[in-house]
Amino acid sequence: MSQNYQNHKRYYPLFHFFTIPLTVLGLGLAIYAYVAIPTIITGLIVLVFFLIAIVALMARMFALKAQDRAARAEEKLRYFILSGKSLPTDLKLGQILALRFAGDEEFLALVDRAVTEKLSVDDIKKSIKNWRGDYHRI
């Protein structure tokens, strides 16, 4: 299936629909148990679930940051190849990441519009006529 504005958001089911909900549920139950029976064991269980939640979220954030850096580098290179110039520094990371969905034929014009009109991420994505899917990012 080809990507477009309506279906480009991706989820990793094991993380988004299993790990996070179960961690939140476990933390909630651990807190409930600690309130009902405040012992060192229930306190440690709360701490363990809290740490699991932090580790899960930090792992997700670190992976997204690495993907953002790679995508920014790819778009800088693509802009240089197409224009022979450096990507404008006025663009924010979110704008650059949104521009990655634009095909080469409209990329340069859309970069110029994003800079001059200060287009939002959503406006950039909605302006794309020939969507270039990103099937590797989650």
Image (spheres, rainbow, N blue to C red):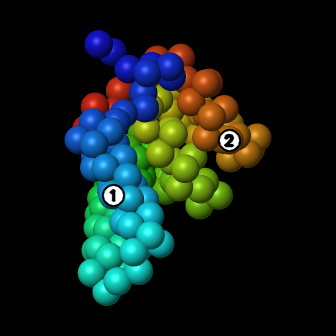
Q: Residue 55's x, y, as percent?
A: 30, 69
Query: Which amino acid type is marked by label 1?
Result: Gly
Q: Residue at x 36, y 33 (%)?
A: 10
For numbered disc 2, what is the local secondary structure? loop
- Mark 2 vs mark 1: which is more N-terminal? 1
Q: Residue at x 30, y 62 (%)?
A: 56
Instruction: State the residue in front, 110 or 55.
Output: 55
Nearest to viewer (mark 2 / mark 1): 1
- Residue 29: % across, % down: 38, 59
Q: Nearer the viewer, residue 111 or 58?
A: 58
Residue 81 visible in the displayed image: no
Q: How many marks?
A: 2
Instruction: Name the image quarter holding residue 131.
Output: top left
Q: Circle 1 sits on which residue?
A: 26
* Residue 24 seen in the figure: yes
Residue 21: x and y in percent read 36, 47
What residue do we see at 33% from left, 15% from top? 2
Q: Is residue 23 above or below residue 132?
A: below
